[in-house]
Image: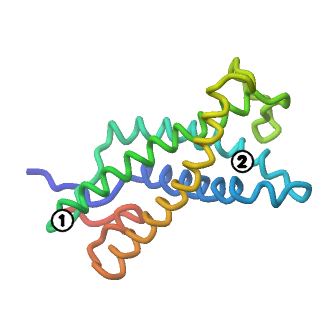
Amino acid sequence: MPPRTLHYDRVARALHWTIGSLVIVNILLGITHDALRGVFQAMFWHQSIGLTVLALSLVRLGWRLSHPAPPLPEGTAAWEKAAAIGTHWIFYTLMIFMPLSGWIFTSAGKWPIPFFGLFEVPKFAVTKADPIVGTLHESHETLGWIWGALVLLHIAAALRHHFILKDGVLLRMWRDAPER
């Protein structure tokens, strides 16, 4: 039997850290954009970063479906495995739904949607009167807070594995690990 890889490959790791960093920045921009109004164009950056997250997340999802995750350490409790798998699929859903929902409800606005000032992103054919626009806006805000909490939980779980359990789970996403 060939050895099993104990780490994510370089592409998966690069996508993880890039998207993760962008998501954290975007959650912070989303939460603070009202306070930053007049000082910093938070929504300009929030929208452009969100569209970047959407594009990278589609790549990441394709990569993940074609490159299985390394196994969790032997002895990992069934509930922890279920929580890890469930949380990861919730993250994939949010990485696609959140930017897409923002893009749709922003399309109802009167302003163009710039992508880092390089070009304008096409708008969806919606208006502020469309019920989906309000629903998506409210969902986007509520799920942003939930996503922030899940990110903190994800970080706490990774740190628990690294510093308390010392089982190498964090290292799977940090560097190449030996084969077993």
Q: Is residue 72 left or right of residue 92?
A: left
Picture layout, residue 9 above or below residue 125: below
Question: Neighbour class for label 2 at 10 Å: few (<14), some, many (≥20)?
Answer: many
Q: Residue at x 69, y 53 (%)?
A: 30
Question: Neighbour class for label 1 at 10 Å: few (<14), some, many (≥20)?
Answer: few
Residue 139: quarter of image: top right
- Amino acid carrying mark 1 in the image: Ala
* Relative image position of residue 169 (x, y in whole percent): 31, 67
* Relative image position of residue 21 (x, y in whole percent): 58, 58
Mark closer to the chain start, 2 or 1 = 2
Label ID, residue 77: 1
Marks 2 and 1, how far apart at CA: 38 Å
* Relative image position of residue 176 (x, y in whole percent): 36, 63
Q: Is residue 48 left or right of residue 52?
A: right
- Amino acid carrying mark 2 in the image: His
Instruction: State the residue lying farthest toward the top.
Output: 125
* Residue bearing the label numbered 2: 46
Instruction: State the residue lying farthest toward the bottom.
Output: 164
Q: Residue at x 55, y 48 (%)?
A: 143
Instruction: State the residue lying farthest toward the right.
Output: 38
Picture layout, residue 105 above or below residue 26: above
Callout 2–callout 1 Cβ contact below 8 Å? no
Q: Is residue 92 left or right of residue 102?
A: left
